[in-house]
Image (cartoon, rainbow, N blue to C red):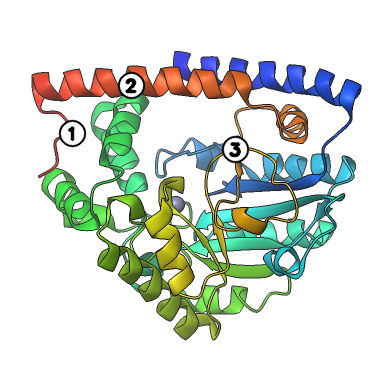
Amino acid sequence: MTLAAQIIQKSMRADALLGTKRRLFFGERPGLVVGLFHNVFRNETDLRSGLANPLEEMTLDRFKAFLWEWHNAGYRFVSVQEILDGLDPMGQFILISFDDGYRSILDILPELENYKAPAVVFITSANIETDIGFWPNTVYREEMARHGSKANASTLIEHLKGKSTDQIQRFICDRYGYTALRPRGEIDRPLTRDELAKLSHHPLIEIGNHTSDHADLTACQTDECFRQIVTCQDSLARITGRKPVAIAYPYGRFNADVILSAQKAGLQLGFSCEEGKNRLPLNGMAFKVKRYDILGTMGQAEQCQRARSDMTLCWSITKYLLHTIIKYRDRAREQKTGFGRVA
Ligand SMILES: [Zn+2]
């Protein structure tokens, strides 16, 4: 584990500890917790295969532990539709969300069924419509194969976020060749159209919008931002027969213009990556719904304690300091070597 990852975990543990003490003294606030997942690996072997970006390092066993912890804590698993219909402001609820549209959601269905836990799957439609995989997997796989350095791969992935799809694909083709854009198999591939169509009819699953190309909407002009959202809406309506009512902003990035575009496209809820428990009713926060990124590298019990306590003080300070350090380090590195520069 890198030093940065260790610092992150320590700050989260400190929040869990502080928050639990606060909860014991002042009681638990009601509200809605939203958990964020991406790819869930079948086991450690798949996770360590080097074929896919490990992301949160979530495995099926860790996902089962997540479900058990929240069930045991007395939280009720809810769907997007139940949120829109209105939840008891004094209740304790949890919504499970998956971003991007990995095939691995199919492995998880039996676990969701065990707990009758609904989930919303936010889909990047261009990956479903084409044979192109999720680009961070390509960068991770190819950098690991060439240099064997996780840190190198992570730095490059962070650097590419915010670039346009064309820029990223051009960079990947130049650096690794066109075929590198294709997924390598079950571990890293998106859902197929048929799988998504079938999945959308599962009673516990709702399909959401994650834009057409996983675009950083805050970096788009207004027209392009709207096009990204509407193209995804239309594509998902063609595949599933229904237009989504919720969007997860790629990289969690949004602003007032992005919200306006989402509303204009007919969406009713917007999910960010800002951490925190959502107070009910959502009212003016319907397009700023907070989510906790659920890590596989940290115990599910600790993360459950942290989210229940709604304490993000230590983590917020650590995050700010780490971002600042990384930003200056990358800028210095790019000026010196041109590494990661994208035309
Ligand atoms: Zn995403």
User: Which residue in the protein does label 3 denote?
Assistant: 275
Q: What element carries label 3?
A: loop
User: Which residue in the protein does label 1 denote?
Assistant: 340
Side (left or right) of 233 relative to 219:
right
Q: Which residue is drawn at 62% across and 42% down?
A: 59
**336 to 77, vertically: above or below:** above
- Picture mark count: 3
Q: Which residue is drawn at 74% across and 41% down?
A: 66
Q: Distance between the residues labelled 2 and 1?
A: 14 Å
Closest to the observer, 180 or 275: 275
Q: What residue type is labelled 2?
A: Ile
Estimate the x, y position of residue 200 in percent, counting from the top left.
60, 75
**182 to 326, vertically: above or below:** below
Q: Which amino acid does label 1 sit on?
A: Gly
Closest to the observer, 312 or 137: 312
Side (left or right) of 83 relative to 199:
right
* Earlier sequence position, callout 1 versus callout 3: 3
Task: Identify the disc placed on residue 326.
Answer: 2
Question: Do the numbered discs 1 and 3 sit on residues whose CB atoms are within 8 Å?
Answer: no
